[in-house]
């Protein structure tokens, strides 16, 4: 979404663990060393690198506002009914139905609130410069999209200028001794290998 449409102003999400660290719920041990929001999940780290704000729904009622709007209810209702009617029980087949419904909603259906087709409304907002989306740009110190869309892990540089991850030692030439550095890991599903950027 970020690569195709650019950076939105903000995301409004619930407090699920993929979006937010909550003390007492997400700690691995009973001794809670970190407070809520002292640890950023991978998703939040990507948004921080992109300069996108995050607003958390603090109650189930607020969360309902995310799920209740017409597009989600419209797509959810039709997805279930269509899969039942077509006797679809496989997730891959259901994905085709979902893709069709999203395409139809965005490009053919007139929205009940705005009175416009969402895609046409979005394109007009871009032309008239009335959108909060900003063009996707790679900001320094990053050099590639791989620096942004990746897994991140912090490690301490040992006296031999190496870091260890999963019993694998990696050389980090020129790194300051005994300093924490961040490894940015880009897995490749096909080869099973990962590119590591420091």
Image: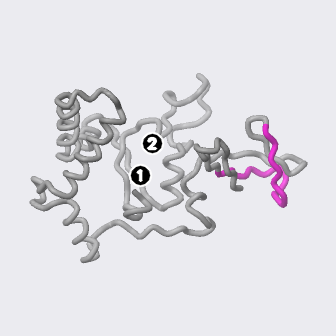
User: From the image, which quarter does the N terminus lie in?
Assistant: bottom left
Residue 55 % position (x, y): 38, 50
Query: Seen in the image, is 164 located left or right of residue 101?
Result: right
Instruction: Please report the residue visible at 49 percent of the width from the left and 47 percent of the height from the top.
Output: 43
Q: Is residue 74 magenta?
A: no
The quadrant in which residue 190 appears is top right
Pointers 1 and 2 in contact (CB under 8 A)?
A: yes
Front residue (pair 176, 170):
170
- Say which mark, if any, is on residue 54: 1
Disc 1 crowd rating (10 Å Cα; few below 14, some 14-19, many 20+) is: some
Residue 17 % position (x, y): 46, 36
Circle nearer the N terminus (1, 2) = 2
Instruction: Please report the residue visible at 22 percent of the width from the left and 55 percent of the height from the top.
Output: 106
- Work out which residue is located at the far top of the displayed protein and give it: 30
Query: Seen in the image, is 151 located left or right of residue 198?
Result: left
Task: Label 1, secondary structure: give it.
Answer: strand
For the magenta stretch, what is the residue range? 168-184
Front residue (pair 134, 98):
98
Distance between the alpha carbons at the discs numbered 1 and 2: 9 Å
Query: Seen in the image, is 77 located left or right of residue 193?
Result: left
- Relative to 88, say whether 41 is above or below: below
- Relative to 124, say whether 16 is above or below: above
Colouring scheme, one of rainbow, by chain, secondary structure, one colour: one colour
The count of marks equals 2
- Say which mark, if any, is on residue 19: 2
- Relative to 121, say whether 129 is above or below: below
Front residue (pair 14, 2):
2
- Work out which residue is located at the far right of the displayed protein and give it: 160
- Say which mark, if any, is on residue 147: none
Instruction: Please report the residue visible at 22 percent of the width from the left and 72 percent of the height from the top.
Output: 124
The quadrant in which residue 87 appears is top left
């Amino acid at each position: 979404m970020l690569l195709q449409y650019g950076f939105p102003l903000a995301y409004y999400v619930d407090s699920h663990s993929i979006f937010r660290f909550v003390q007492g719920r997400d700690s691995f041990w009973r001794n809670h060393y970190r407070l809520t929001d002292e640890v950023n999940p991978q998703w939040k780290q990507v948004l921080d690198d992109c300069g996108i704000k995050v607003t958390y729904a603090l109650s189930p009622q607020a969360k309902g506002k995310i799920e209740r709007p017409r597009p989600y209810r419209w797509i959810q209702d039709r997805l279930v009914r269509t899969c039942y009617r077509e006797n679809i029980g496989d997730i891959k087949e259901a994905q085709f139905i979902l893709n069709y419904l999203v395409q139809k909603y965005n490009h053919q259906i007139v929205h009940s609130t705005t009175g416009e087709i969402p895609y046409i409304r979005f394109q007009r907002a871009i032309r008239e410069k009335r959108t909060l989306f900003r063009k996707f740009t790679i900001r320094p110190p990053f050099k590639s999209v791989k620096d942004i869309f990746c897994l991140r892990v912090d490690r301490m540089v040992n006296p031999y200028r190496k870091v260890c991850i999963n019993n694998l030692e990696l050389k980090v030439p020129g790194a300051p001794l005994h300093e924490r550095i961040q490894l940015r890991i880009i897995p490749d599903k096909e080869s099973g290998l990962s590119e590591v950027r420091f």
